[in-house]
Image (spheres, rainbow, N blue to C red):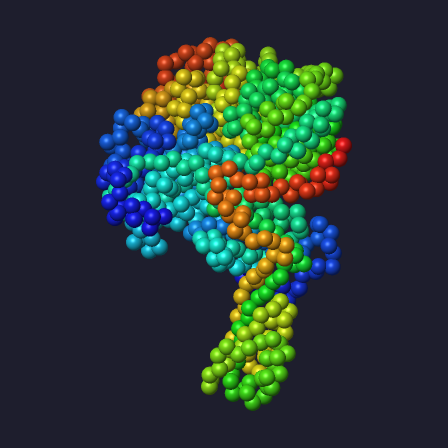
């Protein structure tokens, strides 16, 4: 979590076999409970697995929080981790997806000296080419903002570095699942004493032939 | 939650309320949950609860232990023998940190506990106050759930959740840390409402009938099916359902050490113990069966040996209440998620009535080989020093398998689990997953309180006994009747065995000296005897069992005996060694 490995070492997605490591986006719906972040984090640290990115914030449903966790692991490992997370009392539901299955963004802020940037750079071109915008313009400094994938936000660092980039910060990844109906209906099922079948999705359910051969 | 409760207080509702302290609300919750015994140790930060307890002496029995580790192991013993939730009290700081081993043990062995720790005043949290420790964070990895209460109004609801979580689904330990101000604070108490639903917590997966059907089809087509069962059956109170299933399907069945006793030792389909020091047949034939049916067990590495050579030829049916256990270690062909009390009867309905005589006889052939190579000499030696096995064998003759056997960890544990005759469920209390030396003495005390009508025999090594020897004080003060057998080989025997077999007999710090155990017991007012002569064994065991009150019997056994069979670490179960 402390280091962004992917910045210097982008993950290899070339090999799509099940055992190959790749980035996985883990989405966790939870109650808003003190200590739950730790309970979830130690599931990774116990197995010496680095969290590449972690975002947690209130979801679209009041009182329900959503975690987005990114790790680089084999699917087998990710599946086991997700089951361990879902086992926690205050966790409602866990999903995991490859990068292909989600739309994701990271937000980045860049602080530069207004003098230098105004003098030496065509700011208009810079903003347009990098999909960035100026958030604050002061006499002494200017803050640009951009959103995008890691490579895109990295690209703007490279561009601004020669002009005395003063400070840079990047958010964790947030990801929307392409194939998802949201969580509202599912939550209603959770609130019932006798849940519907959907609450416990069995990964084998739709793969009957694959797991059962005589 | 706080807001909701306060509304109730300020609005003059029709509900009757009484003004009570957080401590009283806690004790009322325990009584409402059916708690009769608390194992605990007082201290500064839990004093208001102990003050309230003073007036509850007639409703709640408190057993004063000698160390918090002893308290929590006693709670575990109570839970394991009774099937109820064990309740433990400890103070903040060192009181709480002394619980960690027991929490870890209960977590890995799925033992239902509600542990209450005192905590410093809420306004002192994070100030390094006297006896302040971050108990919630320290215990997070070793609890099923934990929660810090800082306001008394939370107590009834939090306790209700705690009991619900501890005992349902896959059981486990729950820790509730209560700050001192919340213990003292008075609030309008409306009575206790048990919890039966938490929206984010699903204790039981939904039973999928397709998998039951698929499992039954596999079982009906199998030529050499083999059942492995674990503690899940005991935790799910599904002993009768299990018996009906194996008796209809006629499938040989073997147990993990925590599963021992589900069916009697001498049941014709009980083919013995699994794992590193388990029986010969069950280990070897795991790699020859065609369908492996695992019920309420988690394929621990001590059971499977080398995973990539484990039952690769077999189709695997795995019944478990915890979805995280399915495919964790062994890939299942058919996963049967659910409570085995529900799934087993469904399966029994669909399986054919059968007898697998030839296949069962194969297990008996291996058993004969094991008897000839190992068991006969272990149980019936005629010369030399006594063996651990013959002590257990003599004990079986006297107890007829009716006693609860509590074991510590090491060679004596393996010998006791292998040879103890058990007629009933909840008769075997041992530290399986964590392997906690020092577990047996306090666990035996708890087991007796949990099942007062049954005889409790603790079998302990000379090393482990010295780890929690102080609990003799608990026996002295509570007057509990626990029979203690120390199998003294003057070594930390299991480590010595490994050093002999794998480290060229380099006996590194396994030579342990012991005090005069009988004299120590006598100092606590506990009767005792030490024997080293085979001829004295039956009489000494009889004297121990007939003694009114606790008794410590120290048996000097052969120093360098090894437990066999053995699956060496890193080997396949079919590479099990008989010597």
Which residue is drawn at the image coordinates 43% and 49% (left, top)? Answer: B137
Q: Quadrant of the C terminus of chain B?
A: top right
Q: Is residue B16 visible?
A: yes
The x, y position of residue A190, in whole percent, is 50, 44
Residue B322, quarter of the rendered image: top right
Which residue is drawn at the image coordinates 55% and 31% (left, top)? Answer: B339
Which residue is drawn at the image coordinates 37% and 27% (left, top)? Answer: B472
Which residue is drawn at the image coordinates 57% and 36% (left, top)? Answer: B206
- Which of B456/A155 is in front? A155
Residue B315, quarter of the rendered image: top right
- Which of A200/B237 is in front? A200
The x, y position of residue B57, in whole percent, is 27, 28
Q: Is residue B308 visible?
A: no
The x, y position of residue A154, in whole percent, is 61, 71
Q: Using the image, determine if residue A109 lies above or below residue B194.
A: below
Q: Using the image, determine if residue A60 lies above or below residue B37.
A: below
């Amino acid at each position: 979590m402390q280091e962004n490995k992917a910045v210097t070492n982008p993950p290899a997605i070339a090999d799509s076999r099940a055992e190959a490591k790749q980035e996985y986006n883990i989405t966790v719906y939870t109650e808003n409970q003190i200590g739950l972040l730790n309970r979830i984090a130690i599931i990774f640290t116990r197995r010496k697995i680095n969290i590449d990115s972690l975002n947690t914030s209130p979801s679209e449903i009041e009182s329900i929080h959503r975690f987005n966790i990114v790790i680089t692991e084999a699917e087998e490992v990710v599946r086991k981790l997700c089951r361990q997370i879902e086992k926690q009392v205050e966790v409602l539901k866990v999903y995991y997806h490859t990068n292909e299955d989600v739309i994701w963004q990271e937000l980045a802020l860049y602080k530069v000296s207004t003098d230098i940037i105004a003098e030496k750079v065509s700011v208009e071109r810079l903003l347009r080419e990098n999909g960035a915008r100026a958030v604050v313009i002061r006499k002494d400094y200017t803050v640009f903002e951009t959103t995008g994938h890691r490579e895109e936000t990295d690209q703007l660092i490279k561009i601004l570095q020669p002009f005395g980039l003063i400070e840079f910060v990047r958010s964790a990844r947030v990801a929307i699942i392409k194939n998802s109906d949201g969580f509202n209906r599912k939550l209603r099922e959770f609130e019932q004493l006798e849940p519907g079948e959907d609450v416990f999705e069995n990964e084998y359910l739709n793969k009957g032939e694959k797991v059962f051969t005589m | 939650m706080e807001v909701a409760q306060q509304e109730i207080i300020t609005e003059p509702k029709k509900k009757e309320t009484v003004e009570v302290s957080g401590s009283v609300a806690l004790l009322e919750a325990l009584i409402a949950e059916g708690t009769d015994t608390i194992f605990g140790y007082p201290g500064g930060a839990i004093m208001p609860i102990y003050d309230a307890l003073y007036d509850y002496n007639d409703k709640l029995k408190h057993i004063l232990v000698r160390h918090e580790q002893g308290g929590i192991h006693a709670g575990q013993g109570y839970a394991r023998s009774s099937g109820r939730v064990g309740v433990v009290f400890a103070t903040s700081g060192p009181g709480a940190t002394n619980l960690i081993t027991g929490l870890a043990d209960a977590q890995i062995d799925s033992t239902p506990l509600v542990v209450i720790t005192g905590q410093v005043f809420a306004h002192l949290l994070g100030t390094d106050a006297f006896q302040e420790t971050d108990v919630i964070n320290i215990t997070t990895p070793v609890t099923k759930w934990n929660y810090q209460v800082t306001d008394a109004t939370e107590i009834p609801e939090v306790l209700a959740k705690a009991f619900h979580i501890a005992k349902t689904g896959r059981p486990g330990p729950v820790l509730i840390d209560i700050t001192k101000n919340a213990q003292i604070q008075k609030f309008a108490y409306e009575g206790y409402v048990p919890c039966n639903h938490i929206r984010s917590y699903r204790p039981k997966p939904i039973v999928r009938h397709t998998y039951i059907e698929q499992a039954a089809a596999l079982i009906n087509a199998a030529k050499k099916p083999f059942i492995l069962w674990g503690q899940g059956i005991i935790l799910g109170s599904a002993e009768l359902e299990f018996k009906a299933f194996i008796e209809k399907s006629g499938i040989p069945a073997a147990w993990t050490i925590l599963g021992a006793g589900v069916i009697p030792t001498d049941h014709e389909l009980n083919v013995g113990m699994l794992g590193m020091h388990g029986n010969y047949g069950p280990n070897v034939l795991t790699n020859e069966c065609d369908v492996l049916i695992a019920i309420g067990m988690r394929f621990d590495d001590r059971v499977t040996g080398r995973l990539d050579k484990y039952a690769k030829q077999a189709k695997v049916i795995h019944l478990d209440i915890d979805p995280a256990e399915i495919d964790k270690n062994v890939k299942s062909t058919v996963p049967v998620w659910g409570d085995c009390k529900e799934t087993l009867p469904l399966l029994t309905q669909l399986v054919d009535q059968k007898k697998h005589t030839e296949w069962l006889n194969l297990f008996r052939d291996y058993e004969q080989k094991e008897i000839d190579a190992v068991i006969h000499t272990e149980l019936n030696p005629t010369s030399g020093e006594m063996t651990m096995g013959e002590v257990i064998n003599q004990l079986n003759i006297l107890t007829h398998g009716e006693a609860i056997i509590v074991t510590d960890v090491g060679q004596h544990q393996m010998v006791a689990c292998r040879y103890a005759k058990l007629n009933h469920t909840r008769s075997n209390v041992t530290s399986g997953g964590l392997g906690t030396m020092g577990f047996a003495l306090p666990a035996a005390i708890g087991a007796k309180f949990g099942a007062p009508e049954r005889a409790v025999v603790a079998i302990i090594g000379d090393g482990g006994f010295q780890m929690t020897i102080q609990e003799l004080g608990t026996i002295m003060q509570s007057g509990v009747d626990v029979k203690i057998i120390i199998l003294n080989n003057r070594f930390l025997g299991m480590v010595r065995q490994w050093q002999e077999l794998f480290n060229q007999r380099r006996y590194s710090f396994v030579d342990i000296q012991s005090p005069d155990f009988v004299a120590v017991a006598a100092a606590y007012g506990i009767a005792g005897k030490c024997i080293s002569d085979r001829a004295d064994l039956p009489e000494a065991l009889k004297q121990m069992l007939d003694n009114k009150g606790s008794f410590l019997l120290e048996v000097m056994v052969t120093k360098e005996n090894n437990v066999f069979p053995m699956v060496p670490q890193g080997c396949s179960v079919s590479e099990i060694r008989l010597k």
